[in-house]
Image (cartoon, rainbow, N blue to C red):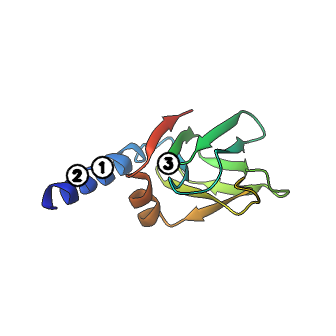
Amino acid sequence: MRASLGFVVLALIALTANAQSPTATSVYIYKYADAPGVHAHVWIDGGAKHYVKAGEVLIVQLAPGQHEFHAGDKQPSVMQLEAGKAYYFQFGGGFYGHPTRLTQVAPEQGAFDVAKLKRIDN
C-alpha cells in the first residue's frame, strides 16, 4: 500500500514537472478506462484530429494564447491558455458511447486522473 502511494506521488510530480515550461502550455485530454465507446475525437485549433481511446491521455504542448478545442459538439471550447500552466479536459456526454464534449477539470483532479492512464503524445 505504501509503495503504491509513493508511485502515485512520483507520477504526479513527473506530470506537473512536464507542465512547468515557461514558454509552453501542457494540455491533457483524457478518457476514463471505464468510459463507454471505443474512442473519442478531438480537434485542436481546427487542425489535426486526434483519437483518444478509453484509458488514454493525449498530451499536447501548445504556445500560450487562445486555442479552440472541438470534440464533436456544435460549439467548440475556446480557451485562453497561460504559459507554464497545465490544463486538463475529460471527455463526457454523447450518445451510444461517442463522447461529444470536453469538460475542463481542476488541475489537482486532472493530475490524479491521468496518472492512472496510458500516455499518448500528439
122 horizontally vs 118: left or right: right
Alpha carbons under labels 1 and 2: distance apart: 6 Å
Q: Residue furthest left?
A: 2
| Helix, strand or loop for disc 3 | loop
101 horizontally vs 2: left or right: right
| Residue corresponding to mark 2 | 7
Q: Give the residue type that dot 3 points to.
A: Gly
Name the residue rendered at 48%, 53% in the picture. Answer: 85
State whether residue 25 appears in this view. no
In this rendering, which labeled residue sits more in front, label 3 or label 1? 3
Q: Give the residue type that dot 1 points to.
A: Ala
- State the residue in front, 93 or 74: 93
Name the residue rendered at 57%, 32% in the picture. Answer: 122
x and y percentages locating residue 30 in the rendered image: 55, 51
| Residue corresponding to mark 3 | 55
- State the residue in front, 57 or 65: 57
Name the residue rendered at 60%, 42% in the picture. Answer: 52
Alpha carbons under labels 3 and 1: distance apart: 16 Å
Q: For the residues labelled 1 and 2, say whether their Cβ atoms are less than 8 Å apart.
A: yes
In the picture, the disc for residue 11 is 1
Q: Give the residue type that dot 2 points to.
A: Phe
Q: Quadrant of the N terminus?
A: bottom left
Q: Earlier in the sequence, mark 3 or mark 2?
A: 2
Q: Characterize the local packing of mark 3: few (<14), some (14-19) or many (20 or more) Cα atoms within 10 angstroms.
A: some
Q: For the residues labelled 3 and 2, say whether their Cβ atoms are less than 8 Å apart.
A: no
| Quarter occupied by residue 105 | bottom right
Q: For the residues labelled 3 and 1, say whether their Cβ atoms are less than 8 Å apart.
A: no
